[in-house]
Amino acid sequence: MFLHIPYQAVGNWLSPAGERARLSILIFHRVLPETDPLFPNEATAASFDARMARLKRVFNVLPLPEAVARLKAGTLPARAACVTFDDGYADNLTVALPILRRHGLHATFFIATGYLNGGRMFNDTVIEAIRRTRADRIDLSDLGLGHHELAGIEARRRAIDAILPKVKYLPLDQRDRVVAELAGRLTDQALPDDLMMTTDQLKALHAAGMEIGGHTARHPILAGLDADAARTEIAAGKAWLEQTLGSRVRVFAYPNGKPGADYLPAQAAIPRELGLEAAVSTQWGAATGADDVFQLPRFTPWSPSPARFIPQLLGNLRRAAARTGYPKPKN
Ligand SMILES: [Zn+2]
């Protein structure tokens, strides 16, 4: 039996209503139909369903723009939370949306527009090439990516974990060249071209009442771009979404999202100047009314066990409180 009443009591203490509210913003990327042996901890339909069932029993889930407006106004309910997805994977529509609807939950989807309609994110090129290769090892040292054992699923997972952080921080053009070269060396099989949404799928997600937010066009590390290039990437993604959906884009997520490493604090002015209402990072935490609404922290419960989902969300709130002060009890 799931004991949600004590969790609500802890939540009321750590995440009270009104001026002292703390907003929990959850991050997801993919929701797979079935477990992927290469990524056994990635959310699946079954685990996402179990998590959303628990979330709505303990937290009050709001659309992100409404939650941000109420955070600023001091009118959030206790235990306020938002659900967000980054990147624009097709499974967000085909797997996650039916589950969200069944639970009556709202979510915000941050879309990297440059990969829709048959594109593939650089990380997926690496993952899918390593998944398909017949090689037992590969030397990528001339690409600056080291030498990797590939015999067995554990070795492949380790290779992916070692390669992705290096590829991620390459300049955009070099990043795309290097992953194409890596894929060509590993396999001659075609890699999937249906991982990301099509325009029609994106429109269906929007028509279902979900919030669509910006996530740039090509998912660059903004910190490596000059001010003009960073603005162009953010503005291009936003403009494409607005033209395609015929409605205003209100929220933005920084690619990769770590303040300082992935975007510069000064770049947080760009979404505001472009007329957005809020932006989220991947800094772990829970937002308070004192936070910059263009750098709101988020949190991902990392345990694959749905039973750990609420305890980890409450743990995040407790750590946030330890940093910025526990809410004072009301008189
Ligand atoms: Zn992303």
Image: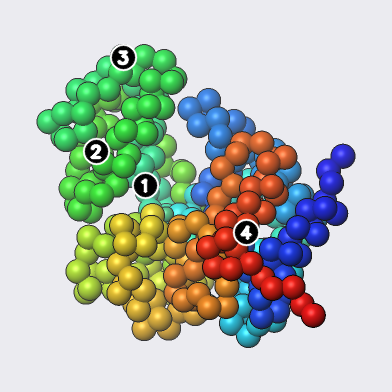
Quadrant in the rendering for residue 229:
bottom left
The correct choice, above or below, for 309 with respect to 211 in the image is above
Side (left or right) of 16 relative to 6: left
Question: What type is the residue that disc 3 sits on?
Answer: Asp
Query: Which of pointers 3 and 2 lies earlier in the amino acid sequence?
Result: 3
Q: Is residue 60 above or below residue 136?
A: below
The residue tagged 3 is 136
State which mark lies toward you, 3 or 4.
Answer: 4
Is ligand 1 less than 8 Å from the beta carbon at label 1? yes
Badge 2 element: helix
Q: Mark 3 to mark 4: distance in Å?
A: 44 Å
Q: Which residue is drawn at 26% across and 42% down?
A: 167
User: Is the C-beta separation of discs 4 and 2 under 8 Å?
Assistant: no
Q: Residue at x 76, y 58 (%)?
A: 10
The numbered dot on residue 317 is 4
Name the disc covering residue 121, or none.
1
Residue 119 versus residue 56 in the image, above or below: above
